[in-house]
Amino acid sequence: MNRGIVLLLALSGCALGQQPASSNPPPALKLTLKDAVNLALKQNPQVILATLNTGQAQQERQIARSGLLPQANGRIQETVNRVNLEAAIGLTFPNFPQHVGPYWVSQGGVGFSAPILDLTLWRRYKATQYGIEASRAGEANAREESVLLVVSQYLGSQRAAADVQAAQSRVDLAQALYNQAADLQKTGVGTGIDTLRANVALQNEKQRLIVAQTQLETSLFGLVRLLNLDPRQRVELADPVTFFDTPQVNLDQSLEAAWKSRPELQRILSEEQRAEVNLQAAGDQRLPRLTVTGFWAEQGLTPASAIPVYQYQWGLDFPIFTGGRIRAERAQSEIAIRQLKQQEQDLRNRIVFEVKTAAAEVASARNEVDVANLGVQLARQQVEQSRDRFQAGVTNNVEVIQAQDDLARANDNQIGALYRFNQSRADLARSIGQMEALYAR
């Protein structure tokens, strides 16, 4: 039994050693925010689907356009005919056969049709153009949403990275304070309780570092998912956390820019125009339609005896009774227009709310950054002075531990304020419809 176990372990080791090299994870990918945004615009499934929807709308326009153009079809056929004369004429003739045939007829030629006057077809073709514009606006909206998600995830990852860096810095500081307390205890200046308090603070900071590292790792996983990368792909952030000072927001100009640029609003406006054209098309069905049709062919009992035959005709069709279909189609289009008008008004109100909220958050976050930076400077001075006092034996390290906690809170406030400012800038750009223009170019 022991030999069997050894052999099994040996075979397992060989199998593991022969795994293909492709199973190794790819090297880490360093991405700037701009790189991440451009990669998402190329690979995000929602953006790809929106692009395909635009292509489908363009093909629908080609289909509608074909209805306005002449249609021609070629046809070659050979038929066998046997006719019952009694049934066809309704009479019988003495000494006359009851039927004719069978006989063969060969025919080959071209048939055609062309609409000369049909306003309904023209309206439907025109409506497809507004459908393309609506699809393009939907595609732009998908791109804006994708950029916003990536920017938010990237900023969140930057915040997590800053938390890790700050936590590591606090661990180093706590380690230095612990060493200081231990050295003072050895020389008889400090006490055991001071060393114990410093050790407790050190372990707390190490715990915070572990939590921050886990948060960074999971945040980067989310970024990989948004970019539609290989799940094994590791990502590193190339952009540092920075503060971009921006001018004060002009609310009126921002609202005007939002009403011109927001793709959701442009899509609804295009849908309104499409519905109005469909309403006109429904009414145009009551008008006459003029068409021309015909065919030309070589026809005969045999191919050798075939002669040209043809038929050309025009027709004027107009509805007399449609069972209420046209009236129902007009009512349906009118209801669609009212629905879109209501959606437009609701969206305009939402845009005003989003722009005002984002502008207020940008102004508030800018002030938060200034206050947080000052708080970090004061907290660092407090830690230095507390360490000097503890070193001199003026006080115990309770004051040092408290100053250390104040510095940790100040670091958290600074990181949070900077994150909120950068996120509020992204929210303002999204509310105006300028996400791609700001972050991808």
Image (cartoon, rainbow, N blue to C red):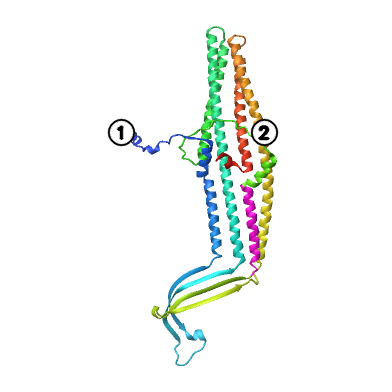
In magenta segment, residue 280:
yes
Q: Quadrant of residue 205?
A: top right
Whether residue 423 is visible, yes or no, is yes
From the image, tell me which residue sits under label 1: 7
Circle 1: element type:
helix
Q: Is residue 84 left or right of residue 416?
A: left
Q: Quadrant of residue 402?
A: top right
Residue 78's x, y, as percent? 42, 75
Q: Quadrant of the N terminus?
A: top left
Q: Out of 102 and 87, give the one closest to the viewer.
A: 102
Mark nearest the camera among 1 and 2 is: 2
Residue 128 image label: none
Furthest residue in direction left, as rendered: 3
The overriding secondary structure of the stretch rendered in magenta is: helix
Q: Quadrant of residue 67?
A: bottom right
263 lies above or below 112 = above
Q: Is residue 2 left or right of residue 184?
A: left
395 lies above or below 13 = above
Residue 363 image label: 2
